[in-house]
Amino acid sequence: MPILSAQNILLRLGGTAPLLDNVSFDVEPGDRICLVGRNGEGKSTLLKVLTGEMEYNSGDIVKKTGLRVSRMIQEIPAHIDGTVRDIVMGKVAAGSSAGWTGVKDGSNEDGHHDSAAEAILGKTGIDADLPYDSLSGGQKRRVLFARAVAEDPDLLLLDEPTNHLDIPAIQWLEGIVTRLNCAVMFVSHDRAFVRRVATRIFELDRGRVRSWNFPYDKFVQFRDQALAEEEKANALFDKRLAEEEVWIRKGIQARRTRNEGRVRALIKMRQERAERRVRTGNVNMQITEAERSGRMVARLTDISYAYADETTGGVSLPLIKNFSTEVSRGDRIGIVGPNGSGKTTLLKLILGELQPDQGEVRLGSNLEIAYFDQMRTRLREDKSLIENIGDGQAYITLNGVKRHVLSYLQDFLFSADRARGPISALSGGERNRLLLACLFSHPSNVLVLDEPTNDLDMETLDLLAELLAEYKGTVLTVSHDRAFLDSVATGILAIEEDGNIFEAVGGYSDYEANKKIRDKEAAAAARVAAEKEASRSSAASNANGGEGVSSAPAKKKKRSYNEEREYNSLPEKIEKLEAEIAERQEELCKPEVCTNAARIVELQKEITERESALEKAYERYEELDSLG
């Protein structure tokens, strides 16, 4: 039985077409629903409608009696009085008046709330006594997420929950969300996050919500087929309408004998065509390329860099230690690492904008560098889009071709009216599209992109990735979007612990696989070192025990009889778990399962349980294997 049903919700915010046009859907217990759609389609608005923060014109929202709904909004409040504990425990006022979370319909017993709050508080990894205002953007988002979860809702609404989070924090969020005992509806453009979390997809397109009862990749396949079929149906309809218009305009004799039923059908067709909402086109991006650079773009030799400020008490802390690399023409390098690890600093060192404390940086010849991040500071808020792109000129030159500024902005989905309006009226996604328009209008052979994917819808992200993959110059990008890095990067520079940087060939998935191997090897080496130390300690103790006591090193511990049996049975157990996971993943792709929401949730749960068991089995096998 659904915990929430939206029935024919209509919402108009001015203009001719409603933002929500008779939207209907059900939310079932345990659903993890990703709400997808183009920028400006109304995804955040729909979440506000569900919590009652925004009124709608007509329709009904039917909720289970006592339903608790909690929402974490997209915008992070810059200031909230209180500590992390105060916020998560609910000692700071919640609700829409606070601007960051709300609980509607139903109440929660204080004792149960406190236990839920303590549980999630311990998982944030943040000192509970720190003031909220002292936290970074990513830490604030973790705290607000924890507060929303601490309300123990039946339905949790999340608006862009991965914004401002680094990759480890996003993976932490994935683990929490997939284990919650409540339904979740979230908006996200982070494809890797959506793939791991969502069991259903709600697509908001031209005012309507279409429900797809299967994971994201399957949704994309079926959605593309549905759009192709819609395009064919529209073409046939338009052809038939044109034929009927020719018929109605025939001569006098034909008009006298015309069929009145056919005339009424034509009038209905005209109305249907007038009401058709055309899907927004794709961004048509093109990079203006300069003459190619030299083969070597930058060479870093044994560089180190440290910083000291009031946060470190004046003590120099290493960001980068003894790092050497060479960036060549055509490389597409992704720079990753936790927030505050020095990713932007590394970018500036590579480009010669910062000097290392030691080591040398050499730049190549004929570099024409375009900076995505710098474009943000160059935007003039009080000026129109046209004035920002063309500096007051009506035309710009792109790859030797003269283009009108309005025409160029239309490639980035800005209408003429929007292009003449001020930048201050743009949404986050529109602002980033404008930044890309500014960036690509400048000739370059080196593109520097610091978090270019924030707020962009998935279709625009795909096109940006394709464009960068075809770019003949060099790309340096800082990003926490794993799917984007897999699509674009030919190499990864990962800032790890203590200022060490690891280079990996390929995208983020390649780096992650390599890191898992290195972590296992390091753990095995640590066990061997610990055993050697224990052996030396035992030998020293025996030597000091007096005559007749052997000083021979302690023998390596052997597996017991039961441990030996367990060790021999583990390969078969691992093989069985892997087969069961593969079977369930294959079943998820079957057409008859794609329309069965309950079975999808069940399969996702079974896969998660078996993946957890598989990881434990591998760890146990390695532990027993080390005993010999």
Image (cartoon, rainbow, N blue to C red):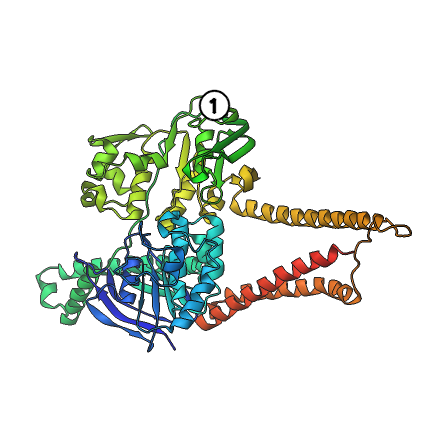
Above or below — where is 442 with respect to 335? above
Residue, x 34% and y 40% (percent of image)?
285
The image shows residue 56 at horizontal and vertical percentages of 21, 66
Above or below — where is 613 with respect to 489? below
Of 509 and 205, which appears nearest the observer?
Answer: 509
Residue, x 51% and y 29% (percent of image)?
328
Helix, strand or loop status at disc 1:
loop
Residue 199 visible somewhere in the drawing: no
Q: Quadrant of residue 231?
A: bottom left
Quarter of the picture holding the C terminus: bottom right
Q: Quadrant of residue 582?
A: bottom right
State the residue lying farthest toward the right: 548
Of 516 and 209, which appears nearest the observer?
Answer: 516
Q: Amino acid at mark 1?
A: Gly
The image shows residue 384 at horizontal and vertical percentages of 20, 39
The image shows residue 626 at horizontal and vertical percentages of 74, 54
Of 296 and 121, which appears nearest the observer?
Answer: 121
Above or below — where is 1 with respect to 243? below
Quarter of the picture holding the N terminus: bottom left
The image shows residue 207 at horizontal and vertical percentages of 26, 61
Position of residue 228 in the picture relative to residue 357 (left or right):
left
Residue 82 visible somewhere in the drawing: yes
Question: Which residue bears the numbered disc 1?
Answer: 364
Badge 1, how many Cα within 10 Å: few under 14, some, many 20+? some
Residue, x 41% and y 29% (percent of image)?
445
State the residue lying farthest toward the front: 546
Above or below — where is 440 with respect to 579? above
